[in-house]
Amino acid sequence: MQLDTNRFLRDLRSLRDIGRYRTGVHRPTYGAEDMASRHWLCERLVEVGLEPSIDGIGNVFGRGPATGTRLLAGSHLETQNHAGWLDGALGVVGALALARAGLPVDVCAYADEEGHYGNMIGSRSLIGDLSEQQIDLARNKNDGTSLRDALASAGLAGRPRLMPDLSRYKAAIEMHIEQGTQLESANHRVGVITGIVAIQHWRITFEGQQDHTGGTTMRERRDAGLSAVRFLSEIDQEFPRICGERTVWTTGRIVLEPNSTAIIPGRAEIDFSFRDLSSEVMERLRACLRRLLQESNRRERCTATMQQISELQPTLCDPAILDAFSLAAGELCP
């Protein structure tokens, strides 16, 4: 097998030009740039001899001959807002290169892997794990646009959702940029992952009392912003005591209302997530978060509540596929 690496790099750079933003790209799900990238991929799929389609949830699928067992390879085309240009694109263009080399590969660009409208809605739709009711309820996490309206604006309303015969595939594979420093720090060129981590996303809300900053003494205040900051500080003290070796946690969004230095925040909202490969570790972190919330309610003058926004379960990769990848990686990058 001989891969056309020059064409691979040209395709990557061509895809980068769709939604290019400074050194990265901006292709939010179902936006004009995202849909342009999906049509771009369909044209490339025809060139490599695959039959392209875009289904009713936005998945792009390139199907080869009907006979024989194949691999399913790909990733996603949409991006986070103002994101890196290789996230997702590397896996899609890599799959395209495999098909161009004549390997028995079907190519897929899964819709909304970045979660603008929910958890993995494209890949879940492919395996029959996304109901029509869930589509009805889904909203864009940034602006509240309904998924139904977004699909209609993208020209996808009324199209059937593809649910392929999964027995056709020996495995589903994906090439991905690391998005970290572990390989580089260890002076390694490639890595083989052992599993997909669990993710829990929580929204924690603090309700205090909105008052004028000049006329309300510090002793009288019920400052929701301060309660939120102290809560996050407690997380950073407690999580290291119970986390795993590779646990990570992130505060991705803090909103204060009314967001003015002239008015004491009467409400604060935090979006917080944590990740680990171990279900046991995830349960410990969940329990710790709830305990810290209870302690905050006993200690603070503000009332705190928490709501789970989403949860993904951990998944270990197939040992046989790992062995094959490890062998190939060892030969190419000893």
Image (tube, rainbow, N blue to C red):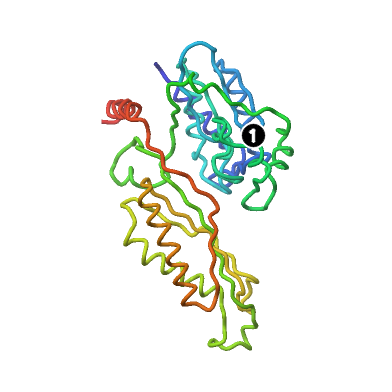
- Quarter of the C terminus within the rendering: top left
Label 1's element?
A: loop
Residue 310 x %, y %: 53, 50
Residue 254 x %, y %: 55, 64
How packed mark 1 is, by other alpha carbons closer than 10 Å (few <14, some 14-19, many 20 or more), is many
Q: Is residue 54 left or right of residue 198?
A: right
Amino acid carrying label 1: it is Ile
Which residue lies under the disc numbered 1? 57
Residue 239 x %, y %: 37, 61
Residue 240, relative to residue 188: is it above or below?
below
Residue 326 x %, y %: 30, 30
Residue 197, relative to residue 269: is it above or below?
above
Residue at left offset 46%, top offset 18% = 70
- Quarter of the N terminus within the rendering: top left
Residue at left offset 55%, top offset 58% = 307
Q: 193 and 16: which one is in front?
A: 193
Residue at left offset 51%, top offset 30% = 92
Number of residue marks: 1
Residue 111, relative to residue 54: is it above or below?
below
**Which residue is the extreme one toward the top?**
67
Q: 70 and 165: which one is in front?
A: 165
**Which residue is the extreme one toward the left?**
334
